[in-house]
Image (spheres, rainbow, N blue to C red):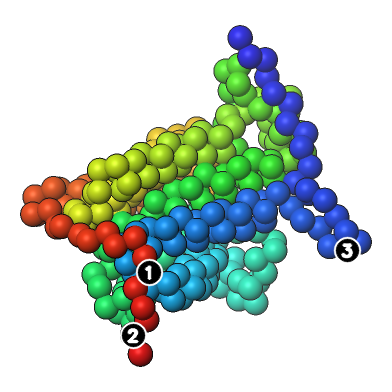
Amino acid sequence: MLAFVTWDVSPDLFSLGPFTVRWYGLMFALGFWIGYNLVAKMFKREGAPESWLGILLIYVAVATIVGARLGHVFFYQWDYYSAHPAKILATWEGGLASHGGAIGIIIAVILFSIFTTKRSPLWTFDRLTIVIALVGGMIRCGNLMNSEIFGHATTLPWGFRFVRSVEWQTLFAPEACHPTQIYEALTYFALFALMMWMYWKKNVGERPGLLFGTFLIGTFATRILWETVKNDQVAFEADMALNMGQWLSIPFVVLGIWLVIRAMRRPRLRLAYPGHFAPDKK
């Protein structure tokens, strides 16, 4: 049987003078880099223009950061930020919401489809969400390195004592807590593996919306589950039957179920797989 884990890992990877590289930033950047290369392989397999990659990267990177920040502002702490609007830009103080990031990415992909691919947004969603699952898992690993976003106190043998966390020292010490970052990371990695198998081995990209729907169900249904052992992010959640993260997850799960049913009821497409990038139209 495992003993409680005393988690005393520095969030900083290394420093060079005033410049510090943090594990969280490394995980975020590495996830985007790996994701970019995986999307490139999919675009090349299906004969999409290579120029779409850089455009999509810009859309998604901006949408993720802006959406996640505004999601936290509007969903969790609007009372504070409405009184201190300049603080909305202070992202270094923390405060990102994954649901806001998801909404931002949805808007970005729709715009990308309108102005760049001229295809259904589902074509991009089905391929992009595969790598988003991977990036989500890596970001949760970054949260672990930061000793943040952990769960309630637990007597389970795999509980973590987050000794570098002020929150843990104030509210839970010396009890161990659920390492919900690990729970969520493992969920994301399992979802990533499933979707990679679906795309590369079963060619389910020929059923528009099936991968996207699978991602939404896998991500947000498990989010509802893991929220039951996570701490409230803000005080007003204490009186809610479901916390804000759970309520925000429900529409995504419903949308995912609808997309899966829709994809399975429609005729399967027959896509070509030329294995090289298409030339850009001039």
Q: Report how far apart the C-alphas of labels 1 and 2 lie in the structure.
A: 12 Å
Q: Residues within 10 Å of mark 2 (few under 14, many from 20)?
A: few
- In this picture, is 68 found above or below 157? below
In the picture provided, is 2 more to the left or to the right than 9?
Answer: left
Query: Which one is earlier in the sequence, the residue at label 1 or at label 3?
Result: 3
Q: Residues within 10 Å of mark 1 (few under 14, many from 20)?
A: some
Residue with the most extreme right position: 17
- Location of the C terminus by quadrant is bottom left
Q: Amino acid at mark 1?
A: Phe
In the picture provided, is 62 more to the left or to the right than 248?
Answer: right
Residue with the most extreme bottom position: 282
Where disc 3 sits, the SS reads: loop
Q: Which mark is residue 277?
A: 1
Image marks 2 and 3: residues in contact by CB distance under 8 Å: no
- In this picture, is 212 found above or below 104? above
Where disc 1 sits, the SS reads: loop
Q: Which residue is mark 2?
A: 281
Image marks 1 and 2: residues in contact by CB distance under 8 Å: no
Q: Residue 266 at x, y = what percent?
A: 9, 54
Q: Amino acid at mark 3?
A: Pro
Image marks 1 and 3: residues in contact by CB distance under 8 Å: no
- Which is nearer the eye, 63 or 57? 57
Q: Which residue is mark 3?
A: 18
Q: Residue at x 34, y 73 (%)?
A: 278
